[in-house]
Image (cartoon, rainbow, N blue to C red):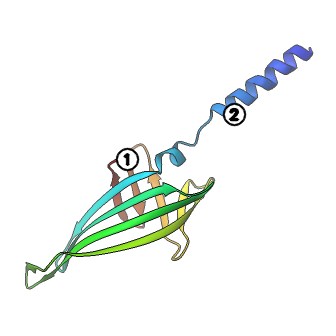
């Protein structure tokens, strides 16, 4: 009887240990987005790296051109550094300064920041 109980306990521990959070393991990497409209054209890159147990560091690099009278202006660049916290329950990141919600879709290789969709490239 004790042996059966022990084997069941070991099986439960083994099953629990083998369960991985696919979203959490998908998060680190580089994601890109391109957008354009009447007034500007922009390319965004997000580089996400773990920086603690549930903390992530995000580097956002943006290159954009302002469009005036139908002509693209000189390329301009901006860089931002975000910190975000991973929620195990919702499987999302929340950016700590402005509260941006970052949702991951490992099955399609994408993430969304609000309505803007980024494709993972590595």
Residue 7 appears in which quarter of the rendering? top right
Disc 1/disc 2 C-alpha distance (Å): 26 Å
Q: Residues within 10 Å of mark 1 (few under 14, many from 20)?
A: some
Q: Residues within 10 Å of mark 2 (few under 14, many from 20)?
A: few
- Asked if residue 102 is positioned above or below residue 38 in the image, the reply reads above
Residue sitting nearer the eye, 16 or 122? 122
Q: For numbered disc 1, what is the local secondary structure?
A: loop
* Residue at image coords 7%, 80%: 70
Q: For numbered disc 2, what is the local secondary structure?
A: helix
11 to the left or right of 108: right
The residue that label 2 is drawn on is: 16
* Residue at image coords 62%, 53%: 88
Marks 1,2: beta carbons within 8 A: no
Q: Position of residue 47 (x, y in %)?
A: 40, 58
- Asked if residue 71 is positioned above or below residue 111 in the image, the reply reads below
Q: Position of residue 3 (x, y in %)?
A: 87, 14
**Looking at the image, how many numbered discs can be counted on the residues?**
2
Q: Earlier in the sequence, mark 1 or mark 2?
A: 2
26 to the left or right of 39: right
Please identify the residue farthest to the right as the structure is shown: 1
* Residue at image coords 81%, 25%: 9
Residue 80 appears in which quarter of the rendering? bottom left
Q: Position of residue 18 (x, y in %)?
A: 63, 31
Residue 109, labelled with which disc?
1
- Asked if residue 80 is positioned above or below residue 31 in the image, the reply reads below
Q: Position of residue 4 (x, y in %)?
A: 85, 15
86 to the left or right of 65: right
Where's the N terminus, which quadrant? Answer: top right
* Residue at image coords 45%, 63%: 58
């Amino acid at each position: 009887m004790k042996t059966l109980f022990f084997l069941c306990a070991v099986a439960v521990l083994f099953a629990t240990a083998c369960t991985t959070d696919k979203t959490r393991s998908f998060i680190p990497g580089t994601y890109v987005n391109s957008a354009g409209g009447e007034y500007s054209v922009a390319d965004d890159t997000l580089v996400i790296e773990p920086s603690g147990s549930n903390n992530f560091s995000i580097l956002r690099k943006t290159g954009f051109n302002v469009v005036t009278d139908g002509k693209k202006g000189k390329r301009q660049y901006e860089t931002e550094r975000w910190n975000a916290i991973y929620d195990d329950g919702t499987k999302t990141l929340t950016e700590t300064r402005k509260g941006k919600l970052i949702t991951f879709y490992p099955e399609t290789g994408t993430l969304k920041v609000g309505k803007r969709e980024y494709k993972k490239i590595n």
